Image (cartoon, rainbow, N blue to C red):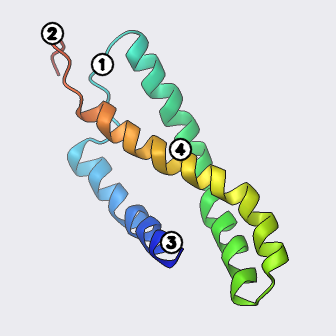
Amino acid sequence: MGFAILATIGFLVCNPFLFFFERIGHSTSKGILQTVHYCILISHTLLSFTLPPLLIATVVPAFRARFDMHRRLGLVTFPIWLYVSLTGLLLCWLTQLQLPGIEE
């Protein structure tokens, strides 16, 4: 869990640089793939804003040995965290995808 939190913090620090300098988030696809890309991007972005307060609220009870509260909050936090992590990887892959016949 500690490594996962550090990886998330590292991603949150590095992501703005990637976004502005590497054009992450810029879709080169057209049609239905572009629609799918933007739907995933919107849900990913909105849910990512909820993660920092949820992570703090979930980790603090664990440090205070309140594992009942930690478990209860973890049931909400974990699926959101997993979705945001996996869709982040999917979005990076979709952004780098070079489809034939599509010019930038």
N-term mark: 2 or 3: 3
Q: Which residue is mark 3?
A: 5
Where does residue 83 sit, x and y in percent of width and height?
A: 56, 45
Which secondary structure, mark 4?
helix
Nearer to us in this view, 6 or 17: 6
Is residue 62 depicted above or below 39 in this figure? below
Q: Amino acid at mark 1?
A: Ser
> Which residue is located at x 32 percent, y 41 percent?
92
Left or right of residue 14, residue 62 in this image: right
Q: Amino acid at mark 3?
A: Ile
- The crowding category of the residue bearing disc 3, from other C-alpha atoms within 10 Å (few below 14, some 14 to 19, many at least 20), is few
Asked if disc 2 and disc 4 are in contact, CB closer than 8 Å, the reply is no
Left or right of residue 55, residue 102 in this image: left
> Which residue is located at x 58 percent, y 55 percent?
81
N-term mark: 2 or 4: 4
Q: Looking at the image, can residue 50 be seen?
A: no
Q: CA distance from mark 4 to mark 3?
A: 18 Å
Where does residue 91 sit, x and y in percent of width and height?
A: 38, 37
Q: Quadrant of the N terminus?
A: bottom right
Nearer to us of marks 2 and 3 is 3
Left or right of residue 90, residue 56 in this image: right
Give me the disc on residue 45. Answer: 4
Q: Which residue is mark 1?
A: 29
N-term mark: 2 or 1: 1
Give me the disc on residue 101. Answer: 2
Is residue 63 depicted above or below 75 in this figure? below
Q: Quadrant of the C terminus?
A: top left
> Which residue is located at x 29 percent, y 57 percent?
17
Q: CA distance from mark 2 to mark 1?
A: 10 Å
Q: CA distance from mark 2 to mark 3?
A: 40 Å
